[in-house]
Image (cartoon, grey):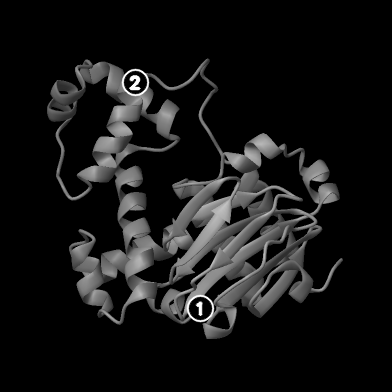
Amino acid sequence: MAAAQDLFLGNNRVVRAVSGTTIALTAYGAGAGFEEWHSHANDSISLLLSGTHHESLQGRELKRTPGDLKFIPAGVMHRCEQYLPGTCKINLDLNGQALQKMGISEEQLAGLSGSSLPAKFTLLKLYHELVAHEVPEASTELLLFQLFNPATPPKHKGAPPLWAERLKDLLHDEWDKNFHLDDLSARLGVHPVTISRYFPLYFATTLGNYMLQIKVNKALTMIRASNTPLTQIAYNCGFADQAHFTRTFKAITGYRPQEFRKA
């Protein structure tokens, strides 16, 4: 396996290997203000924890912000620049043998990009276990498999209906509202029974847990990007108190909020 510095540009603070993959916490500062065009020998996934930067990728000019989860196929040329000091990522390098062993396709990898909440939280748990040193290797291997093979309800045919896509946007845009089922039904033009019956099918969880995931996702950025007290972040993200916030954050990410701030 190639050395970490050959896999990820930047300051690789922590590097661990599991099941033919390499995962690293990589920091980018003033010395990483510009990168030449380059590609990676293996497929890679990264989660931006803090900071921002610009990226040129497959004909697109992108501004990466905290919480961005991206997949870059092996051999694809890209360039990153204008790193904000303090930028930090979790990087995952996947060699072909590892993907073959797990039965993972590039289509599945590409599906992790964007704002996939379960993928973000599983990656955080995976990294947390790798640096903890107190869990059996089988546990981290299971998380790696779960990253690419998340638990889902029975398969449905075809793409989610329009109402499910509209509901997803509604929940993310108005995450701080206390919705009633009748309200959602009226706004979506769908019978309440339809929503209650098919929500777990299209969202792979309950409505309550999905809303908690959205709130924790918002907290990820606030914790890493500012020195705002955790009590205030808990309130800003819709939690009644810090104790509930801490329990929920750890259950979803594997970290306590104060641990995540220092990671």
Residue 102 image position (x, y, % from top left): 76, 43
| Residue nearest the observer in this picture, 179 or 58 | 58
The residue at which mark 2 appears reads as: 162
Of the two numbered discs 2 and 1 on the same chain, state the one appearing first in sequence: 2
Are the two marked residues, 2 and 1, in contact with CB atoms closer than 8 angstroms? no
Packing grade of label 1 (10 A; few <14, some 14-19, many >=20) is some
Kind of residue at disc 2: Leu
At label 1, which amino acid type do we have? Ala
Residue 10 seen in the figure: yes
Density class for disc 2 (Cα within 10 Å; few <14, some 14-19, many ≥20) is: few
Q: Position of residue 153 (x, y in %)?
A: 51, 29
**Quarter of the view holding residue 12:** bottom right
Q: Which residue is mark 1?
A: 263
Q: Which-is-in-front pick, marks 2 and 1?
A: 2
| Residue drawn at 67 percent across, 72 percent down | 9
Q: Which residue is at a point 18% across and 50% down the rendered structure image?
A: 176
Q: Is residue 149 visible?
A: no
Up the image or down, 198 lies above or below 148; here it is: above
